[in-house]
Amino acid sequence: MSAEARANPLAQFFLRNQGRLIHKWQHYFEIYHRHLERFRSRSPVLLEIGVLQGGSLKMWRDYFGEGVKIIGVDIDPRCRQFEDDATTILIGDQADPAFLGEIRARFPHIDIIIDDGGHTMLQQITSLGELFPHLQPRGVYICEDVHTAYLDEWGGGLRRPGTFIEFSKALIDALHAWYFAPAGEELDLYTTGTFGLSFYDSMVVIEKRPIEVPRVSATGKAVY
Ligand SMILES: C[S@@+](CC[C@H](N)C(=O)[O-])C[C@H]1O[C@@H](n2cnc3c(N)ncnc32)[C@H](O)[C@@H]1O
């Protein structure tokens, strides 16, 4: 890890970690910090799909500070043991819309969602579809390990229809629907409620924000 990467507070926690196992790609820490720093010490509600040994839940608690509320979701009931005063563990399948509906009903306010679950196409797309609309209007949704969209055993393949990457590419069009949607057509949340999409190696970050109809203007004097 580079000296610059080591200066990152998440990387520092990760490198110091002698406690519960954390399983993350090293380049993720810089990306998390870039998009999540504004939530530190602001008591955010974070939902992470994929608990495994519970190590990342500890890392988030350290990073966001004492007021953070963490919801860990996993299909493996052994993860229940990682529940504590700041952490609720929910056992279920991230590809099950009914389970995700129960999460929405139980937790009306969620600021950050990190999908580090099973990484199949169905899981990633279902979780995004069910949970993104529920995320707070200025929340952040992170789907990680999206390189599985290129791997056959995960249901992926280069430019294969139905992968999370192909789904995400379509969101680029949705972000720009202001410029091509027929007049009067209702625009969806990826147009009216999305500030930006960021693509990194193996990670897609979607930042929500209420968006006004884009307007172009100019100031100053023309010189030719
Ligand atoms: C990569 S690990 C999570 C690592 C953890 N976030 C960390 O950073 O240490 C993936 C986890 O997703 C869980 N998982 C797999 N399929 C799932 C599903 N359909 N729904 C919910 N969780 C699932 C697995 O049981 C496993 O614990």
Image: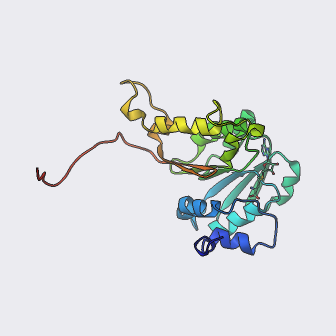
Q: Is residue 85 visible?
A: no
Residue 210: give x, y in percent of width and height: 44, 45
Q: Nearer the viewer, residue 135 or 143?
A: 143
Q: Is residue 51 visible?
A: yes
In the image, what residue occupies the spot 49% across and 39% down? 172
Give the residue at the far front of this rendering: 158
In the image, what residue occupies the spot 54% across and 58% down? 35
Residue 21: give x, y in percent of width and height: 81, 64
Type of colouring? rainbow
Give the residue at the far left of this rendering: 224
Residue 155 to residue 219: above or below: above
Is residue 82 rendered to the left or right of residue 25?
right
How many discs appear? Answer: 0
**Location of residue 54 by image quarter:** bottom right
In the image, what residue occupies the spot 53% across and 34% down? 170
Is residue 119 rendered to the left or right of residue 188?
right
Residue 123: give x, y in percent of width and height: 72, 39
Residue 153 to residue 32: above or below: above
Residue 204: give x, y in percent of width and height: 59, 48
Residue 38 to residue 164: above or below: below
Q: In which quadrant of the rendered image does the N terminus lie?
A: bottom right
Give the residue at the far right of this rendering: 78
**Location of residue 7 by image quarter:** bottom right
Is residue 223 rendered to the left or right of residue 127?
left
